[in-house]
Amino acid sequence: MAPLEPQEKVLVSEDFLDSTHGELACVDCHGGDDTADDKEGAHEGFDPQPSINNPQETCGECHEEAETVPQSLHMTLSTFPGYLEKRASEDTWEKVDHGRDRHCASCHTSCGGCHVSRPKYSGKGFVNGHIFSAKPDPVNQCTACHGSRVGNEFFGARGQGDVHLEKFSMSCEDCHSAEEMHAAAPEGLENRYHLEEAANCKDCHQDLQYGSVRDHRIHNNKVQCQVCHSQSYVNCYSCHTGTDEQGIAYFINNHEYEGMKIGFNPDRIPGNNYKYVILRHVPVDLKLFDYYIKDGFPRFDVASTWKRASPHNIQRRTWQNANCNNCHGQRDLFLDESDLLDYEIKANIGVTVADDQIPPKRARVMPLGIDNSKVNASRVVTVEWLNEHLDDDNLVILDARSESEYEHGHIPGAINLDPNASEGLRTDPYADSALNIEEDETLAETLGEYGIAVDDHIVVYAKRGMDAGFLLGLLDYAGAENISILNGGIIAWELEELELSDEEPDWEEKTFEIAPRKNLIVDTDYLKENLDNPAVKIVDVRVLQQSTGLTGHGLADRPGSIPGSMKFPLPGLYMDDSYLKSAEELLWVLRERNIRPNQTIVVSCNTGSWAAAAMFMLRYLGYPDVKLHDESWINWED
């Protein structure tokens, strides 16, 4: 999320003065002395955050719901210390709680953080010139805090995004009502699912057991809705806290990965008592607060480290519900003891699913009818394959990360070529413009300087799959004959504990005999001419807050999308850390979104880089006619 400009944070617009709140004097909410003659005197007793420090006396003067806000979960985060206190002891809790307060309590907020400004945790500042809004801004307020997980899932920065936004333009408050947000949490509330006012899928989707969907009748009240309707989500491991040399408190998660796990429900709630639920790993660690007290969790095992989750990436049709046996009998999908770190096995007894507890495969299921015969399997290689072929004569390994990441450690023999910054690939990599691939002669010269020939086997990796895909898209256009992405990228290499190098390799320049595939590139005029052509499908691979017009791009004149374009965020094709889902699953997902190989598929984004990454993936999957709109949204004109 882009930071607010300094002037935006403090601007009180003239429109505010015409609003209901603008009729009040500043001192009515903020205190201070409006009779003083100087700034210092005027700010005597001034409270910059009255809705946090005194919501009942400020907001509560007019809004009776403010009476319960001081006890709400947004204000107190009361369920979080409860779990930590369970794991601590009388002797360790005081210091553990001090660490919690320094590192984990900064993201609380109150009325102002939802209705007039960004929350303190995300940088503060007025969202719209001090104008109060009854509904929170989903980008600048809700996901300003709930961004790395909920926001990324909802908007498609991880996966395809959420159908409630994409198809129905629903926002956070459509499910999470004011009654829930303002509700006082009862003392001793175990977790947010126990809050009586908490949102539930069945608030809207009622009487599922009596509907026309057979699977609803079978699974109702037994399987959490998200088991069948969510996409993969992020899991975090081993958080550690500390203080740097400047005295600033920090925390670090040692590992994150995108995946999905089903397990037994650790939180039995009347009326919501599912047997199987989606589980998310929480980053608590035995040494979480070692900076403050060694062995602070002598009772670590009393609470599970895999908690019930509600991913905000719902789709009506998902890979799990495409076929019964995509879930039934799938050992990898259900949480097993082998998925646990050694020190958390006891903590998750009763949550893990043993082999004989997994729902068995169904004998008779409808085939999916996926044709994967056109998939170009050679365009994906594993770390095992690459490690065995490091010394191949015609192998060129390209690291598409930034120079600083490359210098920190890279695969032996890899050459650093960052497509987002390196000159000679685009007309100007730092320009405020679209992709604009370099002239053929310059592009060929650049690739040759990096020791690449057109008939080399070129393997590209990065930390984010789309960065590798961007470079592979450029190589594909240039006519490279044998290109591959490393499945899992640098993270997969590190997880296998394979050798890393900090030395830049020597390489000889080559002649890259460029054979540009001009048919892969189309301009804006082509799109305008084919807006009504049913044989041409325009696929917008931007995140949903941009393609739906909630926010714009910094280089674009306005938010929005190309008329008639299909919204399919690029992370629906790339998992976190460059991992790829199976070709069969990706082909099924694309078919469900009516992105079919019998059409001309034109991929577009903001500047062309994500579109190039999407083009590579679609061509890997065997789509015969894929085109890159390299001018993309920032050059679109009505």
Image (tube, grey):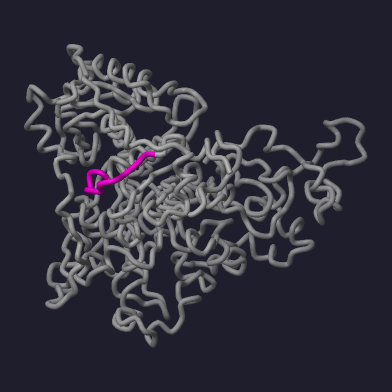
Q: Nearer the viewer, residue 450 or 273?
A: 450
Q: Nearer the viewer, residue 13 or 615?
A: 615
* Quadrant where the C terminus is found in the figure: top right
Residue 284 in view of the camera: no
Question: Is 381 in the magenta?
Answer: no
Highlighted range, magenta: 619-628
Q: Position of residue 514 (x, y in %)?
A: 24, 23
Question: Does residue 499 appear to the left or right of 218 in the view shown?
Answer: left
Furthest toward the bottom, the residue is 210
Q: Residue at x 66, y 45 (%)?
A: 127
Q: Position of residue 114 (x, y in %)?
A: 63, 54
Q: Residue at x 33, y 17 (%)?
A: 442
Q: Position of residue 21 (x, y in %)?
A: 80, 54
143 versus 220 height, above or below: above
How many marks the image carries: the answer is 0
Q: Position of residue 368 (x, y in %)?
A: 21, 67
